[in-house]
Amino acid sequence: MSRHRDEHLALCAAHVVGALDDAGRVELEEHLASGCELCLAELRALSGGLTVFALSLPLQPAPAGARARVMAAVRAEAAKSKAGGEAKDVPAAPAERAAPAVVREEPRVVPLPTRPRPSFATWAWAAAAVVLAVAGVFAWRHTEELSAELERTRARNDAIRETLESERRWAAILEAPGARVVRLAPTGAGDSALAARVHLDPGTRRAILVAQAFTPGAGRDYELWAITPTGPASLGVVRADAGGRAVMRLEDVGDPATLAGFAVSLEPAGGSPDHRKPSGPVVMFGPIGG
Amino acid sequence: MSGSDRDGLLIERVAAQDQEALGELYDRYGDLLHSLAARIVGTGAEAEEVLQDTWLQAWRTAPSYDPARGAVAAWLVTITRSRALDRVRSMASRRRAESAAAVEAAAAPPPPVPDPATGYARRMLRKSVTAAVGELAPPQRQVIELAYLEGLSQSEIATRLRAPLGTVKSWTRQALLRLRERVPLEELP
């Protein structure tokens, strides 16, 4: 039994944020194995705190087809492990019986009983068994291929259906009653050719950014911000195509009643290290109602 | 039934190889895990791959999930963070060949939104968690970000912040307990 010490609580915290070294991990695991209720309760509380932290990160919804692709991968994994399990159930071939024993001693002549020659019927049965086995393998492989194709088709259909529904919902933003268009203008701190507007549906708090001439240059990214009463809040890095055009869908831009506007900053690749504050110059701004 | 109870039942079903249960967990946590992955590896194809790795690992290791050590959400978040940092390490050598994937990902539409009641509850939750993190003292927030999002050890964090190791340990614990206290998460929508 490993006695509880206060240091174990610090080990729990380091473990939860993934900052525990190997020695600490071994010590903590040994201690937890002794069933320390204090440390288990601590782990539960700390991991709850970590979940709160994770929930505070800027929302980046998974792409529409991601669910179908994840489920297809899981189905494939389940099928693979099932097939593996069945294969394990088949008894191993008695290879050692088939392989002749190698005798390196001086040969001693021992008369062996004469082995009876296989009859025609035996050969016929053996040949039929081989034909059946080969046919079985081909049929099994064909079925496997068909099942896999069916799975892929289902996944594609799921993805297409989800995409279609999603597109409809996003298209509805443009026609939603009360929808607003916030135009962002260059501030002078960046390229004057920058053009962007945000279509905002206050009812659902969703928005679409449409941008042009977003070519931040190597090693840099443009980042979109919502200007809230408590300061800026990152809405994510704007990914443009090679021509500098971007369409960014925003699931929740914050409370439209208190939003002051939107801004774009020029950041190091990947965005500002602090998602509550731009680290680079603000190159565009558009006030709501402006 | 509380959100945690429901998650507990779902993970038991996943451990029994129930794919539908995994789908339900995905619906509850897919966006959260993708957001975390995107924060660590950047948005785009890499984040989705992390998401896929995470769910596959959850599928394989659900039988080893131990509710005594934390909620299902925390378990999933921890898996995601590990897979994301693995990917960051493997990306380091082939950095910056990702623009095509990023552009493709940016064009991909987001998933269906939850029903209005759940959507509202989630927005409220997001508001309170953002406020809770915002109320942390800056060094407390930094130690969590450096450890959790950048994969630094506590010694490395102590060096980076020029603070004694013992202080870093204490900040980490205080920050997590403060967040837990501010948002108990008994009812994750």
Image (tube, coloured by chain):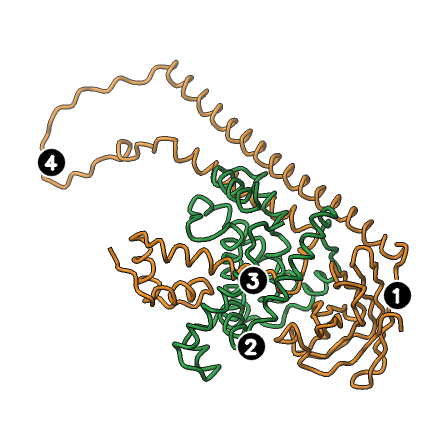
Chain colours: A orange, B green
The residue shown at (51%, 67%) is B148
Callout 1 secondary element: strand
The amino acid on which the numbered mark 1 sits, given as a three-letter code, is Val
Can you identify the residue that label 3 sits on? B182
Residue A151 showing in the rendered view? yes
Q: For this rendering, which residue is in front, A270 or A229?
A: A229
Q: Which of the numbered marks, if any, corresponds to residue A181?
A: 1
Query: Whole-Å distance between the Cαs marked 1 and 3?
Result: 36 Å
Q: Earlier in the sequence, mark 1 or mark 4?
A: 4
Asked if marks 2 and 1 fall on the same chain, the answer is no
Which chain letter matches label 1?
A: A
The relative height of residue A22 versus residue A160 in the rendered view (above or below) is below
Name the spot of residue A49 as percent of width and height, x first: 52, 61
Q: Is residue B67 above or below residue A257?
A: above
**Which mark's residue is nearer the viewer, 4 or 3?**
3
Give left or right: position of A177 versus A25.
right
Q: Secondary structure at mark 2?
A: helix
Q: Amino acid at mark 2?
A: Pro
Q: Are marks 1 and 4 on the same chain?
A: yes
Q: Which residue is mark 4?
A: A107
* Residue A283 quadrant: bottom right
